[in-house]
Image (cartoon, rainbow, N blue to C red):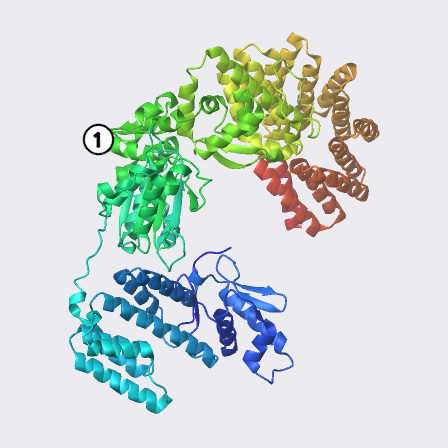
Amino acid sequence: MRTGARFYRLLGEPAAEWEGADLPLGPPQARRLFALLLIQAGQLVSCDRIIDELWGAAPPASAKVQVQGLVSGLRRALRSPLGDQPILTRGAAYLLDARPEETDGGRFTCLAAHGRELLARGSHREAARRFQEALALWRGPVLAGVPVAAEVVARWEDQRLSVLEDRVEAELGLGEHERLVPELRDMLAAAPFRERTCGQLMTALARAGRMAEALDVYGKWRRRLVDELGVEPSSAIRALQEEILCDGPKMTAREYPAYREPAVPSQLPPGIPDFVGREALVKDLLAELVPAGDRGTPRVLLLTGAGGIGKSSLAIRLAHEVAEEYPDGRLFASLRGTTTEPRSPEAVLAGFLRAFGVPSDAIPADVDESACLFRSMVHGRRVLLVLDDAAGEAQLRPLLPAGGGCAVLVTSRFALDGLEIGRPVPLDVLPPADAAALLARLTGSGEIDEDSDAAQQVLEYCGGLPLALRIVGSRIGDRSGWRLADVAVELSVERRRLDWLRAGDLAVRSSLSLGYRQLAPDGQRLFRRLGLLPAADFPAWAAGLADGGDPVHVDGVLEDLRHRHMIQPVCRGTGGIPRYRVHDLLRAFAVEEVSAEPERERADTVERVLGGWLWLAEKAAGRLPGSVLLPEPGTAARTAVDETLVAEPHSWFQGELPALEAAVSQAADAGLGELAWEIAVVAASYFDHSGLYAEWSRCHRRALVAARASGRARGEAALLRGIGQLHLYWDDYPEATRALIESYRISERIGDPAGRARALTGLCVVARSTGRPEESRATAKRALAIFTEIGDVLGMAHLHTSHAVASAELDLLDEAEAELDEAWRLCVELDDPHRMALVLRRQGQLHLRRKDPRGAMSCLRRALELLESLSDELCAAQVRLDIGRTYTTLGERQAAAKVLTGASSQFTGAGNRSSAAACARLLGALSGS
């Protein structure tokens, strides 16, 4: 991975830098190796050549090993904080992976080439500037302090002198001959046989009217050439001498009038004084925009994102920061891409050309000809363009310059995936810290400090959207007496939120509406129906159910919405299905738009989508360990979806947990009590398995209100049974009893024997946990009889186990063993490894009661192995508690402490107070003994 923060220097002492700080290269041999790799940057250098360079004809026997050690040391020295490694191994050779712009030698070469191109076109001032930038990179002789082949030093020194002469030629073209004379005399003295330098000194003197001095320079130079080298001057410099003798036209200062700068347009809008946030991104993009040699292509940044996300503000901030780097022009154009009539490329080009002084009657009517003229005008110049609100790739292509000295900032609501050039920079909402900083800047930090809770609510309602935050700041400033608490109240009502978020010509609804109106009819339908989904984060299949159309077509429409930044991809969910998110304010807009659809259509859509959630949740729950809590299905309509989505049920439930909670709430709000209770009860299988008691409680209590309101008695009983189980886990036995008894009575009233048995199962646990084992056995027998009568094998296995536990507490150990044997037989019949593990745990406890700790440990380890393979950490923690007891009995204190500490942490996290207390008691006994 390239970071762009590493830089290598060879024009002077060899050096490597990271973000401007020198990196230690190590001992002299390491510096020599670094120099060799740097000279050949981007090329392979064989190990044999390295050995030859370092040791000559008499290398040590360990030369290859020493080279490897030197390379390893350099790699450690050059490794960035991000971990990327620039020295690569290719067989028996090494390569320094550095682009030209990452070395001063590469930058020098690029700047020199660019300067010569400018010089050839007569752009003397810009050429001189490039040559001077190139020469400024030199800090001394090439690779000073490191033994380097003489021809390498000579080659680089010749390049330096050539660029110095190029700079002089450019400045002579600007009429600066008088100023250059002293410098040229010094240059000729330092390199007395360079013919071009001699010719340039002669030219400067002649143009200054000092003909005799010019001819004297030639005469002395010729004599030295003949005396020391035995050669005559070339025909070119002899021709120059003749021209001076004849006072040729090229030698008169009159031919070099004052240099006239071309028009330099500066069209940037005013900067944003209160721009806040995105500091890391700003730093990264500024580094991209600062010219560093001619790359051959312009620097193009494509800032894309939803309306109001801050694209234009960021572009203008960047443009003002780098404006001085582009002295030949700063152009700005609003392309009106979100209007019904985007600007044509030819109209934009005409404006640019006029800004450069091209008369209107000289501007071609043909867009291709205008584009060619524009590119010719900016070629070789440093020009910055800001193209705001682009409609798409076709509008942009004719507007892009070709020269590497230019930079372009594009903003668009479209992703611009089809543009052949440019770095995509998709913008998201502001991170919470940046959003808070912007709100503080707009309203005054004192306002936020005084009411941090209200500020947090406002930030949540605005969802990090800079436009919304600016409107809040504006309205607080315009309305004396308004405080953040007042704003929070106004924004808390979703249906009025967009009404409130407007100030002057700023309005969130208007901004969002621009994108919506540009959608095709099928895009508008799907987008507004996203407002009927239970959550802002949704999988593609849910959008397909909301649309009701062909899934393949819906995928295409979703991609178009993504391209327009009206939804954002967040990840791929289970089964590889794409997931998206719609911003809260965009969702509020979708809710507004969908409210215009007929009520029956909206209701059908909601039921269809919620039916899909229920169908998938049931399929996923069916792949989890069986639960005695799960009742028979209700009467809510299911919508079939691809079942492969729940091939990994734990992952699916984990990823869809927020959506499932939202689905229960939506069903409850819509008066769909049957759907509400069924989704909640099915999800409880996962909640129970994963110890998500808070989520379980929220869903069940929300659904319970809906079930009661809609007269869904069976659902009410099932939800109360789940709430009772939660109170059991929390050791709140009075509340558990109330919920379970109410569940039993409802089930009895509606004639639901399975419901009665499930309620009795919970009451059996209450009795046992409160020290009433006889009552627990009696209750277990009643529940067992019902499960046996209706043929519920899972319930029978569960109740045989419960009966066994109560019997063991009464020291009826043989009866307990018989019950557990029967429970095991039923588990084998069910092929239920989870239930087998629970029976094995109880068998282990029974062994402990019989003073057989080794038999207990055998059963408990088998149980733990099964539960860990099923990823049931809570039940595994219960087994670890029993293993801790067993280790204690065996006198293995260290092993007991280790396993009990792990179990205690699990119980504490789940809120299981009684089991956590049991661990604490055992650990206390261990530490005290």
Identify which residue, 552 or 234, lies in the foreground. 234
Q: Residue at x 46, y 12 (%)?
A: 598
* Count of labels in the image: 1
Identify which residue, 741 or 344, lies in the foreground. 344
Q: Is disc 1 surrounded by few (<14), some (14 to 19) or many (20+) residues within 10 Å?
A: few
Q: Residue at x 28, y 69 (%)?
A: 169
Identify which residue, 822 or 58, lies in the foreground. 58
465 sits to left or right of 66: left
Q: In which quarter of the view is residue 849 placed?
A: top right
Res 838 seen here: yes
Q: Position of residue 121 (x, y in %)?
A: 31, 59
400 sits to left or right of 635: left
900 sits to left or right of 793: left
Q: Position of residue 878 (x, y in %)?
A: 68, 37
Res 143 seen here: no
Q: Position of residue 42 (x, y in %)?
A: 51, 64
The image shows residue 922, relative to residue 25, as above or below, that is above
The image shows residue 320, relative to residue 693, as above or below, that is below
Q: Position of residue 608 (x, y in %)?
A: 56, 18
Q: In which quarter of the view is residue 50 placed?
A: bottom right
- Report helix, strand or loop for mark 1: helix
Which amino acid type corresponds to the residue marked 1 in the rendered image? Asp
The image shows residue 784, relative to residue 14, as above or below, that is above
In this figure, which residue is indicated by the disc labeled 1?
Answer: 478
Identify which residue, 144 or 724, lies in the foreground. 144
